[in-house]
Image: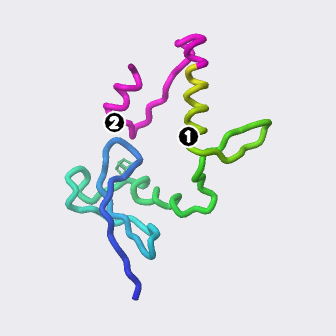
Amino acid sequence: MVEIKYVPSICPYCGTGCGINFVVKDGKIIGVEPYKRHPVNEGKVCPKGNFGYQFINREDRLTTPLIKENGEFREASWDEALDLVANKLKEVSDEDPNKVGFYACARSPNENIYITQK
Ligand code: SF4
């Protein structure tokens, strides 16, 4: 017997926060169905919400950080990658704080933007 589950979630692509139902079969997301009772979008989703799940099961999806050394990428742990980014940011900021800028995407909630600007 094929078991298909509908798992309610929130589309991760922008700050609107549309409700969606992931269609899950054998532990894999195979589609998106409307979440008609969700107060934000009442079942309507844009193409990103409808089809954006497709990257999840791709074989070429990056699942671990990569660090470039001598022109080649090597896999790294999250701790190593985050330490490297933090140290580089501090290095640049110590040299001149005006050299540091941040990009805020449409998915960033107000709280994250507030902290970033501080
Ligand atoms: S479905 Fe479209 S509008 Fe809704 S949260 Fe996703 S990207 Fe934003």
Cα separation between marks 2 and 1:
24 Å
What label sits on residue 79 in the rendered view?
A: 1
| Viewer-side label of 2, 1 | 1
On screen, residue 34 above or below 71: below
On screen, residue 20 above or below 103: below
Name the residue: 37% across, 28% down.
113
Numbered label tally: 2
In the image, which residues are magenta? 91-118
Location of residue 60 (image quadrant) = bottom right
Which of 29/14 is in front?
A: 29
What label sits on residue 109 in the rendered view?
A: 2
Q: Secondary structure at mark 2?
A: loop
Q: Secondary structure at mark 1?
A: helix
Quadrant for the N terminus, please: bottom left
Residue 84 rendering spot, x and y as whole percentages: 61, 32
Residue 117 rendering spot, x and y as whole percentages: 40, 21
The residue under label 1 is which amino acid type?
A: Asp
Q: Earlier in the sequence, mark 2 or mark 1?
A: 1
Which of 17/88 is in front?
A: 88
Which of 14/109 is in front?
A: 109
The residue under label 2 is which amino acid type?
A: Pro
Tell me the crowding category of disc 1: few under 14, some 14 to 19, or many 20 or more residues within 10 angstroms, Cα based: few
Q: Is residue 48 magenta?
A: no
Residue 74 rendering spot, x and y as whole percentages: 71, 45
Q: Is residue 105 magenta?
A: yes
